[in-house]
């Protein structure tokens, strides 16, 4: 297999440009209802039920969240729009138990989570150092706790499922322009609707571009997303949807690590400090194609079949901080050694999934039977040059004018070339007993086959995971539940390499959870309260006591980690025009067991890194119809954490606000984030790699015209 990326940037841009004709075709339908043009949610809609979600498919079956025996939270398009969210990091404050880790990963109920799903399928085009964009996303579903029975291998902390925007039966869309601080500018267009008079064929197309500078010296980002979809109604109750999405990102001055801190969490450098040189970069090109067929055969039987293919290329030329140095002997670190890395990575994945759902009654019992299976194959290859023959980078007075790229002509690169294969089948019964009791039980069998073509090694395993739950509903808008679920996750193929210290045993996990959910007063008050305990075994961590081998970090297992916590959410319509959403999470994640040969210096009983004990967030929105304006204000508090070296990360609180006004022919939104310009860390790595930073104060103005 080739270790060089195959799709070219020009091909990806061509896919993006290809959606433009569909934009034009959809933008001017002869039968559009002109009376709806320019209608604004600020003016015409009540705050009531604005963020309410009545149905989720994260449990594989379309269901009311009250009928799922685990904690579920869904962020819909209204909240994404109100908060001006551009990527997934903008949404974490809304979800208790979820906090930023690094790059595209999150800490989910105490554990790092980097496996995500799109419309229920594997196939994440943002697996490494690019962050998932939200332009193509209708809603984001968070299922808390292990979901091995539903999705196969994954973190026991929880599952994230992105539900993509689909072609709609009614015409709609918008055009947006954006401009703001740090030279931010961009535009987007999104349109959907029927393509024939009968509405048999529907379409959707979107195009997004945004350019902005970072608060880090010489770093910036440029993102282009093209998206198109076609829906074909093959029969009254059968529909096929095909989608294509193209991503192109250029990130100059990246890959960004953090800013080094001392043991008390004090930063050694300014927030603007960058360990990279101005000509370093990440360039990312991704392409995704997926199709799904949904059919209702009868009132008792329905099925769906879906497939997803993706590929991405990532080229990185950057300077990795390695070790802190005290160059003047005053006892304070004032510089870092660095390693220059020239890396290329290509990933191609293909996944399939099928679900058959039967609904029937026997003897007063209501059955919902789920039978399904999924299959996933991922091929990854890469090439890495690494050299430490370069000057220090000062923490106090960095010099960005000297070209420090070393001569790599005499350096021998390392290569990776691997395949991961996952397949599983599952069966679940949901039993309704009268109007008040629901019992759920499920069983899944998974098979895993991993191949490292460079080392010529293979690893195979199998696992059985289970799920059980009980729900009691004293009334239809109150749900009390208890559940138990399991997780199983083979170590990543790259982590099994002997270069990283492998091979390693797979991770396992299980959770007990109990809670209550409400949907009171017709949805005007929604609450959740959950308590849980998760035990996870064979967690891998980077072993900072060992040097990287040719750019590959060394890993070591921690025997057992236990996470315990409580989470609560509230969404309420205080008045007709005033809405409040708030959440709180308490989490205590600690090392509770060890294994023979463990080399990470973290004793049993110690807190686990990047797991804040307390996290709270809120968002309130008040609209004034008389002046066609909505005012929103939100904030987030995260308590202290430790990084992977045991250094303390200080607690922080940040706030943001939005003002939206309808001018009739267009809407305008002004948004400011991190109002008080707090300099803070959201998570930590080790030593010179530092603490990952929260965004500095930023603002933008967006103009939106509904089609």
Image: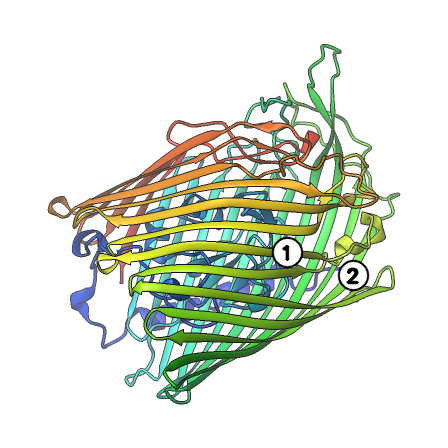
Disc 1 and disc 2 in contact, CB within 8 angstroms: no
Residue 648 at x, y percent in the picture = 60, 27
Q: On screen, 279 above or below 400?
A: below
* Element marked by disc 2: strand
Q: How crowded is mark 1: few (under 14 residues within 10 Å), some or many (20 or more)?
A: many
**Foreground residue among 454 and 529:** 529
Residue at the spot 52% in from the left edge and 71% down from the top edge:
441
Residue 702 at x, y percent in the picture = 32, 46
Where residue 515 sits, quadrant-wise, is bottom left
Q: Quadrant of the C terminus?
A: bottom left
Q: Which mark is residue 509?
A: 1
Residue 44 at x, y percent in the picture = 17, 56
Q: Quadrant of the N terminus?
A: bottom right
Outermost residue toward the front in this view: 363
* Element marked by disc 1: strand
Asked whether the viewer can see residue 107, the reply is yes
**Foreground residue among 639 and 320:** 639
Q: Residue 53 carries which label?
A: none
Q: Earlier in the sequence, mark 1 or mark 2?
A: 2
Q: Residue 417 carries which label?
A: 2
**Foreground residue among 146 and 409:** 146
């Amino acid at each position: 297999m080739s270790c060089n990326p195959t799709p070219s940037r020009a091909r990806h841009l061509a896919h993006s440009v290809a959606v433009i004709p569909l934009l034009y075709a959809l933008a001017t339908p002869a039968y559009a209802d002109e009376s709806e043009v320019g209608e604004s949610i600020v003016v015409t809609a009540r705050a009531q039920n604005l963020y309410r979600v009545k149905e989720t498919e994260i449990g594989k079956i379309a269901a009311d969240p009250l009928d799922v025996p685990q904690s579920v939270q869904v962020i819909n398009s209204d909240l994404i729009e109100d908060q001006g969210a551009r990527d997934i990091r903008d949404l974490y404050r809304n979800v208790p138990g979820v906090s930023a880790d690094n790059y595209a990963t999150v800490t989910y109920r105490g554990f790092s989570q980097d496996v995500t799903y799109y419309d229920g399928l594997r196939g994440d085009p943002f697996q490494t150092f690019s962050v998932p964009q939200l332009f193509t996303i209708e809603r984001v579903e968070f299922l808390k706790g292990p979901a091995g029975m539903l999705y196969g291998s994954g973190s026991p902390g929880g599952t994230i499922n992105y539900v993509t925007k689909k072609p709609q039966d009614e015409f709609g869309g918008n055009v947006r322009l954006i401009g703001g601080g740090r030279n931010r500018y961009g535009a987007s267009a999104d349109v959907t609707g029927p393509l024939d008079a009968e509405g048999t064929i529907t379409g959707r197309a979107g195009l997004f571009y945004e350019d902005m500078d970072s608060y880090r010296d010489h770093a910036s980002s440029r993102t282009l997303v093209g998206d198109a979809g076609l829906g074909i109604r093959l029969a009254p109750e059968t529909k096929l949807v095909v989608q294509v999405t193209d991503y192109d990102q250029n990130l100059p001055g990246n890959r960004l690590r953090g800013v080094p801190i001392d043991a008390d969490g004090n930063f050694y450098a300014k927030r603007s400090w960058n360990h990279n040189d101005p000509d370093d970069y990440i360039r990312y090109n991704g392409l995704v194609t997926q199709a799904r067929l949904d059919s209702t055969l009868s009132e008792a039987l329905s099925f769906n079949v879906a497939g997803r293919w993706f590929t991405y290329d990532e080229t990185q030329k950057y300077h990795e901080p390695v070790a802190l140095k005290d160059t003047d002997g005053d006892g304070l670190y004032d510089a870092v050694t660095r390693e220059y890395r020239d890396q290329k990575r290509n990933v191609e994945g293909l996944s399939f999934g099928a679900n058959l759902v039967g609904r029937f009654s026997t003897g007063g019992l209501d059955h919902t039977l789920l039978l399904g299976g999924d299959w996933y194959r991922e091929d990854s290859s890469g090439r890495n040059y690494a050299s430490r023959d370069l000057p220090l980078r000062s923490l106090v007075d960095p010099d960005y004018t000297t070209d420090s790229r070393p001569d790599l002509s005499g350096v021998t690169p390392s290569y990776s070339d691997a395949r991961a294969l996952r397949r599983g089948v599952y069966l679940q019964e949901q039993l309704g007993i009268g109007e008040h009791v629901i019992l759920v039980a499920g069983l899944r069998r998974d098979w895993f086959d991993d191949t490292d073509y460079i080392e010529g090694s293979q690893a195979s395993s199998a696992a059985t995971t289970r799920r059980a739950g009980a729900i009691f509903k004293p009334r239809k808008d109150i749900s009390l539940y208890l559940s138990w679920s399991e997780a199983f996750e083979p170590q990543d193929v790259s982590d099994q390499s002997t270069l990283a210290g492998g091979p390693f045993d797979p991770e396992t996990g299980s959770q007990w959870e109990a809670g209550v959910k409400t949907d009171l007063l017709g949805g005007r008050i929604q609450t959740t309260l959950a308590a849980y305990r998760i035990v996870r075994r064979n967690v891998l961590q980077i072993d900072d006591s060992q040097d990287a081998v040719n750019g590959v970090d060394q890993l070591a297992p921690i025997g057992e980690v236990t996470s315990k916590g409580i989470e609560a959410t509230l969404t309420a319509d205080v008045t007709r025009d005033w809405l409040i959403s708030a959440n709180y999470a308490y989490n205590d994640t600690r090392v509770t067991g060890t294994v023979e040969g463990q080399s990470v210096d973290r004793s049993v009983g110690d807190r686990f890194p990047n797991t804040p004990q307390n996290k709270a967030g809120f968002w309130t929105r008040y609209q004034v119809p008389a002046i066609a304006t909505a005012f929103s204000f939100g904030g987030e508090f995260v308590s202290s954490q430790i990084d992977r070296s045991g250094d303390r990360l200080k607690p922080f609180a940040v706030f943001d606000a939005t003002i939206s006004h309808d001018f009739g022919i267009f809407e305008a939104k002004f948004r400011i984030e991190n109002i008080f310009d707090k300099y803070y860390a959201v998570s930590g790595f080790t030593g010179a790699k530092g603490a990952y930073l929260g965004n500095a104060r930023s603002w933008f103005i967006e103009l939106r015209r509904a089609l």
